[in-house]
Image (cartoon, rainbow, N blue to C red):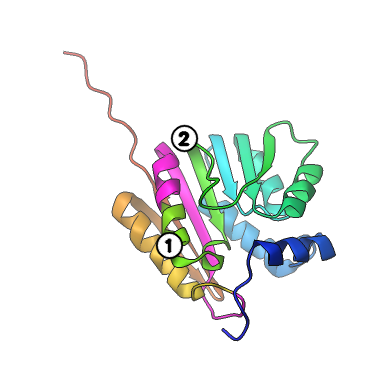
Amino acid sequence: MSKRPIDIHGFEAKFRDNSDPWNYEASAFEAYKRGVLRRACGSRLYGRGLELACANGETTKMLANFCLKLLAVDGSKTAAQTARDRTRHLSNVEVLQALLPQDMPRGPFDLIVISELLYYLKRHDLDETLRLCADALAPGGRIVCLHHVIPFDDVSVPPRMAQDRANTYLGRRFRKLIDAPHGRFKVSAFQRPRLRVASAT
């Protein structure tokens, strides 16, 4: 890692300079990643979903198709506003600016998506974000994590370590459904057990 880790001011500068700094809208690779993420979310309709680090809202639009209510958050004020503008026609979507972990929205959520976020957090913030996400997951709910696993500049922790740390922590608390490599990135999914209903006597 030759560059300094990017912080929220760096992300804000990126989105002020370019509303789509990673070419989410036009890149075939980004479309492929969204397809992998979509399949990892499963085939059910979710009541309340949460997307962390929504960026400009490209993935938000996809997630809105299978969430009755979707809350999308990003630390960058400009990114959040862009996502809000791009999803304004979707009545089931709310977009907020939120810094993690301190502004983690209150659950419960039936689906939580953590994509390309964790390696930008300091290690203690990464761990706290995972804990808060796990606590916010509803019974029967699913957490999906997708992150690059190859080294690159401007991250706070090595990419593979971030995804592995998520897998280890979430795997201790929930049932692992998916743990699949896809070349440069990896996706995993976990489910909280449903509440058992006591049978009538």
Relative to 42, 16 lies left or right: right
Is label 1 in a helix, a strand or a loop?
helix
Residue 45 visible from this viewpoint: no
Q: Nearer the viewer, residue 178 or 76?
A: 76
Relative image position of residue 95 (x, y in whole percent): 69, 41
In this view, the residue farthest toward the left is 201
Q: Earlier in the sequence, mark 1 or mark 2?
A: 2
Badge 2 crowding class, 10 Å Cα cut-off, few under 14, some 14 to 19, many 20 or more, is: some
Question: Relative to 71, is 31 above or below?
Answer: below
Q: Which residue is mark 1?
A: 124
> Which residue type does callout 1 highlight?
His
Range shown magenta: 131-154
Q: Nearer the viewer, residue 118 or 87?
A: 118
Q: Quadrant of the C terminus?
A: top left
Q: Which residue is mark 2?
A: 108
Q: Nearer the viewer, residue 71 or 121?
A: 121
The residue positioned 79% from the left and 50% from the top of the image is: 82
> Which residue type does callout 2 highlight?
Pro
Relative image position of residue 179 (x, y in whole percent): 42, 63
Relative to 142, 28 lies left or right: right
In this view, the residue farthest toward the bottom is 2
Between circles 1 and 2, the one closer to the viewer is 1
Relative image position of residue 62 (x, y in whole percent): 68, 47
Residue 15 visible from this viewpoint: yes
Relative image position of residue 93 (x, y in whole percent): 69, 36
Residue 139 drawn in magenta = yes
Q: Which mark is residue 170?
A: none
